[in-house]
Amino acid sequence: MDLRKARASPILAGINSYWKLLGVLSALVLCASCPGPHRGEILQLMKIHPENERVRVFNSYSYSKQIDIYLEAMNGEPPLLGFATYVAANRDAILPTLLNRIRTAPDDRTRQELLYVLEKMAKFFMPLRDRDDVVKTAKEATSQIRDPLYRERAEASLKVILGAGPFVKVSHE
């Protein structure tokens, strides 16, 4: 039995290394399609493990830069959705910046992607349904979206933002 474990151990180590390498390569391939000035930072962030260390580095950036990185990561194919949770984890502190960015969003896609951050915030970090500034901005932004696909996604986010019930607390620690 010990002989089998001894033989299996290098195999398991190889499998673990394989999955780690596959994860890093996947991040590089995914972000290869991320256009824009923060592409290098996104690639560097995706290489950082464990995730709580990646979050620590991400949180060292200004709120505006965090939002820029998130939006750029969302423009890759497929989009890197995890950054929405990183932004949302800032809770009240990022809300003024986030609400301003929603109000001044240049297009439907950006507006919808920023509403998605509010959805994540409402779902995992703090209830937003009683925040008049958030509710007003989210409703106005949703009503401004003309593209049917982005409008549908924004309406789904708005339902979560306005929704009743408990939120699920998430920690990156």
Image (tube, rainbow, N blue to C red):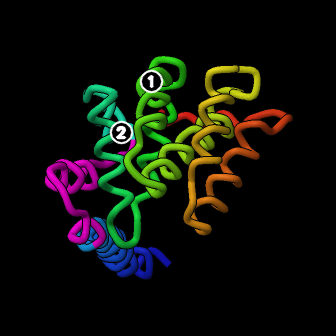
Label drawn at residue 29: none
Q: Say if residue 173 shows up in the picture.
A: yes
> Where 85 sits versus 56, above or below?
below
Where residue 112 appears, as percent x and y from the top left, is: 53, 52
- In the image: residue 62, left or right of residue 118: left
Residue 94: quadrant of the picture: top left
As rendered, which of 163 and 22 lies closer to the eye? Answer: 163
Tag 1 secondary structure:
helix
Dot 1: within a 10 Å radius of its alpha carbon, few (fewer than 14), some, or many (20 or more) residues?
some
Q: Residue at x 51, y 35 (%)?
A: 88
1 or 2: tag closer to the N-terminus: 2
| Residues in magenta, as a range | 30-51
Q: Residue at x 39, y 79 (%)?
A: 8
> Where 129 sits versus 168, above or below?
above
Q: Amino acid at mark 2?
A: Ile
Label drawn at residue 67: 2
As rendered, which of 13 and 150 lies closer to the eye? Answer: 150
Q: Determine if the magenta segment contains residue 41.
A: yes
Q: What residue is shown with label 1?
A: 94
Dot 2: within a 10 Å radius of its alpha carbon, few (fewer than 14), some, or many (20 or more) residues?
many
Where residue 79 appears, as percent x and y from the top left, is: 40, 64
Tag 2 secondary structure:
helix
Q: Residue at x 41, y 47 (%)?
A: 83
